[in-house]
Each structure stands twice: as structure tokens, then as C-alpha cells.
Amino acid sequence: MAETGWKRIKEILDESIKQWEQENGRTPALKVSHDGGLGWETKDQLARSAPFDLQLIEPDKVGNGKARETNLIKILSRNVGGFRRMPSRGPYLSTEEIEEIATWIDDGMPD
Ligand code: HEM
């Protein structure tokens, strides 16, 4: 199988927000809910987003088997500190989708 690239990762995240909108009947207030910001128009924006000072993809955890220790992979999988699993109250990403993102980070976040 071809290596997963950024386009696929963006698709997974965009799709999760679509599912959330369907479930909740409204657009999520992503900006006001995530002090410090959250976005993924580009992979750099995703990596640098740091809601509540929790940088989503810490540079020292990219490309070296540490993807599962990033705040992004942690919060998509379970609560982190005082914060509940994201997207808030679900629907959550599937284990397969979370694994796809983790593998992409371990691969060095290819385009
Ligand atoms: C370290 C990372 C993150 C932190 C600390 C965080 C924190 C929060 C907090 C405090 C809220 C508002 C209270 C609540 O509804 O629980 C929230 C809402 C939300 N978050 Fe996150 N979040 C993070 C990452 C993410 C990611 C990666 C996604 C999407 C894949 C996401 C999707 C959402 C959604 C959809 C809401 C609901 C917004 C609304 O009700 O309008 N969050 N988040």
C-alpha cells in the first residue's frame, strides 16, 4: 500500500468534524473552544496548534516511533489531563484512523 500522506490525514480530520456536525446539529466552535487555537488547513498548522499550551505534534516525537506520545494521538484516544477525549463527546475517530495518523507521524509526516 502507498504511504499515507497529508491529504489523507486532512481528510480523516475533516470527516470527523462532518460527523460531529451531523451528530450535534451545529458547527463546532473550534476556535473559541481551543484556547491557543486549533486548525489543520496545512500540516504545519496542525502540528503547531497548541490548545491550552498542549502542542498537538511535538517536533521531538516525529519520525522516531514516538507518535503515540504526542498530544494529538493521546487526545484522540483518551482523556488528557483534565481534558476529555476529542472530538468532544464524539463521535470519535476509529482505532484504524488513529493508527493511520500515528503511522504518518512516525513516518515523518510526509506530504
Ligand atoms: C490537546 C488537544 C486538545 C485540547 C486540550 C482540547 C480541548 C477542548 C476543550 C476544553 C473543549 C471545550 C469543552 C468540551 O467540549 O469538552 C473542546 C471542544 C471541542 N474539541 Fe477539542 N481539544 C483538543 C483537540 C481537539 C482535536 C484534535 C479535535 C478534532 C479532531 C477537537 C475537537 C473538538 C470539538 C468538535 C469540540 C466541541 C466544540 C463545540 O462544542 O462547539 N479537539 N476541546
Image (cartoon, rainbow, N blue to C red):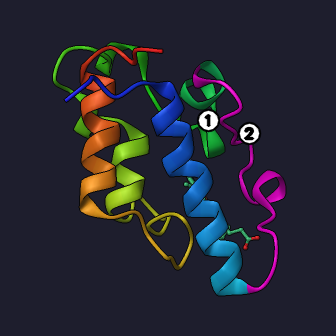
Q: Amino acid at mark 1?
A: Ala
Q: Which mark is residue 50?
A: 1
Task: Give the percent coordinates (x, y) of residue 93.
Answer: 40, 63
Residue 26 seen in the figure: yes
Task: Give the percent coordinates (x, y) of residue 12.
Answer: 49, 49
Query: What count of labels does the image hold?
Result: 2
Mark 1 residue element: loop
Mark 2 residue element: loop
**Near-viewer residue (70 or 10):** 10
Which stretch did the figure color magenta?
A: 25-43
Quick check: which quadrant has ligand 1?
A: bottom right
**Near-viewer residue (69 or 11):** 11
Task: Give the percent coordinates (x, y) of residue 70.
Answer: 35, 35
Q: Which mark is residue 36?
A: 2
CA gap between label 1 and label 2 equals 6 Å
Q: Amino acid at mark 2?
A: Gly
**Predominant SS along the magenta part:** loop
The answer to whether residue 110 is above or below residue 35 is: above
Q: Is residue 4 left or right of residue 37?
A: left
Q: Residue at x 57, y 23 (%)?
A: 43
- Looking at the figure, which quarter contains the N terminus? top left
Q: Residue at x 81, y 51 (%)?
A: 31
Q: Residue at x 24, y 46 (%)?
A: 99
- Mark 2 closeness class: few <14, some 14–19, many ≥20 residues within 10 Å: some
The answer to whether residue 76 is above or below residue 62 is: below
Residue 56 seen in the figure: no
Does the residue tagged 1 have its C-beta within 8 Å of any atom of ligand 1?
Answer: yes
Q: Which mark is residue 83?
A: none
